[in-house]
Amino acid sequence: MTNDRNDTFPFERVLSLRPLIDFWQEVAADASSPRAALGRTILAMLDEAPDLREPITDLAPLERHIELLDLMMTAVFPMALWEQTHAAAFVPFDLVSFYATPAFARLKLLEHLQDDLLINGQPFDPGEMNHMKTMLAYHHILNRFYGIDSCIDFPLIVTTTDEQTGLKRHFKISTDTRFIDIETRAPFKPLSEEQIQRLLADPMNQNLWQEWLPPEQFVFHGFTILTAVDVTVQQILSLLKDDLLQREALTSVDRIDTLQTRLRMLLRAPQLQVGLIGFLRDNGEAITGARAVGRSLLMSEDTLPACEDQCHSYYVQALKMRQPLIVTDLQTCEVCTGFEQHLRQQHLRNLVIAPLWYEDQLLGLLELASPRPGAVNAANAVVLDEVITLLATAMKRSLEEQEDRIQALIKKHYTAIHPTVEWRFRKAALTYMQRQETGEHAELEPIVFHNVYPLYGLSDIRDSSTIRNAAIQADLIEQLGMALGIIIEASTHRPLPVLDELGYRLGKYIDELVSGLHSGDETLIFNFLRDDVESLFDQLATMHERVRERIEAYRTALDPGLGILYRQRKDFEESVTLINETISAYLDRREEQAQQMFPHYFEKYKTDGVDYNIYVGASLVEQQPFDRLYLRNLRLWQLMTMCGVVWELNRLHPKLPIPLETAHLILVQDVPLSIRFRQDEKRFDVDGAYNIRYEIVKKRIDKARIRGRDERLTQPGKIAIVYSQPREAEEYLRYIEYLQASGYLKDPVEHLELEDLQGVYGLHALRVTVADGEPEAEVLYAVPAELTTPLEATGGDGAAHEPA
């Protein structure tokens, strides 16, 4: 049976008020109902309008009895919400409306139902509309005659243009069939239980349903209620999530324009302008080292405007905040530095500056501005919370990608071409030059490698954010304690109430820090020490020699470049650097050996730990046959290399200023994918919408937890191997058994199911403990024969001849 649909609605339908009249008859008969009197009144009025009791083929009777119809429709549309509810009554399963609320009429939704109707964001044709209505009718029959609620639903989104703002608005349409009766015509053969289950198993197969429930046996009497609910905010947020997941989400001009359009609709501000500023480092209290990301309002000329007193500007104020800073009107505000004046010159008056925080790191600022004062205010800015979170995540990715590109340019003399794939770029360049020489239209051809197998590994420093905060906390407490000692010493030699008050504030800050470090504490305390305490030191030093000695000791303890106490944080940063450099150097040494086995693409990144990508396949190499033997060899090499990383870090551990722990992970994907060289980013990225799932998994897998256990997947001293398919686990279990026998790994192997991640489901993992020390005899990297049987042959494209 096929799922072909018919392009016409097959059921007979009759507009009738009979179901609504039946409702009022029940209300009038219920003496306990407070609406009984209204019901009796309506029934009495119906006696004077008998034509309303009959099937309605002409809307004229409804117009003649509009006051009575208004009363009857209070059962459907609450009068208290009459002006706000977007709802209307229609002919059953048709788009002919005979009654609507004023709010529905103002939207003019009927003018857009045929043109702008969306299902899951995709437009569809009238035939699809009829198919949807037909299946809704059939499921209504199943519910009415067999008591089965199949819960079928079609998420209909209608988009219309607001006449006042000119912006798009999105409405979700829901259908109410309470006032529909179904009349059956003989002969009517009831369905068997088996037939019902078959229909439920194929809920959209119109031909099957029509075969077992012929439409000529049913007539729909009554009317349908359609309600439109404004889902603009939800729809825009959903679209923004999709936008910001894409590459170049914040750097492409087109993407910024799209972001601006979405925010205009979200905030209902048609003249809104959007800008983004990114920071490559913590800027403290100054907009220094900032860069425009995509487009900036303040940095409209790619540089900061002149501003001698920027410390008083709204931009610097926003650096200290977690919530958006809103300026209703720049023309009447008290602050007017060079920054604000630059915005005024652009005829901008309303300003919102939202800091973009990722965890405890300030990554940048979102700028929203409009020439209309108050266009964005505290009321409509509430919806920005989720947008700001999404933008912060996208900003972090954007800045990390930029930093990676900077490092790659320096290391590779402003090129990111890996030696393994250099031949492909040389070939593309030669083709380009040949076309230019012959006068043809020349463009650099895209560099794409198909059917390559990815390998991903991660060695991550555990709890790095928590330990970093603890180091900051310890340094702050020590610096405050030294300052308190100076104040106490000064008070003993010259008692002054103002010194007692200052000592009290120092002690209060210390007590608050002991209980925990909060966002903004670091900047707040540094400002306090600099402005209220250290500014007094020269005067306090004249009180006594002991005070002067304490001040000299305080100043000596501060870092000369930063002007702050930087002991614990320095130890932490040195530990992170040592770990990263140790892992990176070890991977570089092993990578040289791996390239000798079979050429492949390799790239690594250093943050709080090191993660790396490997791609291998026939298309990456020139005139060299590829076999899955080399893929398996690389997988075994990767597992052995990860053991080596653990041992390297074990040797390093006693030398670390702070004993940080690392956890290790390998992500397995046996399905080949395509990678494309991005000219703008000068790097490779997975190509195609399907392959983006692999990138999403990589971004989120380090936070994975074990299902049913309050435990992170990654643990120090262990290697977690994440997979999706059972065959991937079978392959790695053979490797693990081999490495256990060789002294690399310990027994046992843990088989784990992972909790679902956002947008990622069905992941499993193997987890195994690395041996305490390296085996005495080095194991060769070639895969043993028992691990390579059977070997799948590959075709010219390098893809294995096995199901994906």
Image (tube, rainbow, N blue to C red):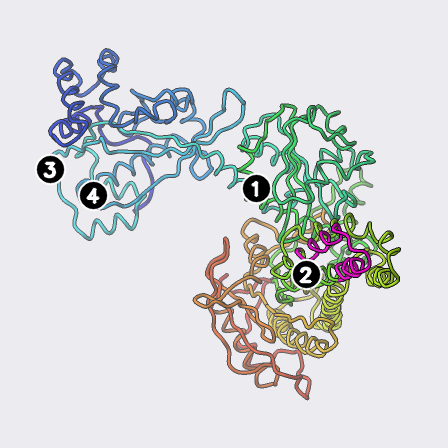
Tell me the mark number nearer the camera, choosing from 2 and 3. 2
- Percent from the top left, x then y, of residue 508? 66, 56
N-terminal of the pair, mark 4 or mark 1, is 4
Magenta: predominant secondary structure element? helix
How far apart are labels 1 and 2 at the CA level? 30 Å
Residue range of the region highlighted in magenta in the rendering: 482-508
The reply, left or right, for residue 252 in relation to residue 100 is right
User: Which residue of the protein is positioned furthest toward the bottom in this rendering?
Assistant: 776
Q: What residue type is labelled 3?
A: Pro
Residue identifier under label 2: 473
Q: Which amino acid does label 1 sit on?
A: Val
Q: Which of 421 and 71 is in front in this view?
A: 71
Secondary element at tag 4:
helix
The reply, left or right, for residue 519 in relation to residue 57 is right
Q: In this view, does 231 lie above or below 766?
A: above
Residue 484 is inside the magenta segment: yes
Residue identifier under label 3: 187
How far apart are labels 4 and 1 at the CA level? 50 Å
- The mark found on residue 387 in the picture is 1
Q: Nearer the viewer, residue 204 or 565?
A: 565
Secondary element at tag 1:
helix
Tell me the mark number nearer the camera, choosing from 4 and 1. 1
How far apart are labels 4 and 3 at the CA level? 13 Å
- Percent from the top left, x then y, of residue 25? 13, 27
N-terminal of the pair, mark 4 or mark 3, is 3
Q: What residue type is labelled 4?
A: Trp
Would you say the residues marked 2 and 3 are in contact, meaning their CB atoms lie under 8 Å apart? no
Tell me the mark number nearer the camera, choosing from 4 and 2. 2
**Dot 4 crowding, Cα within 10 Å, few <14, some 14–19, many 20+:** some
Residue identifier under label 4: 212
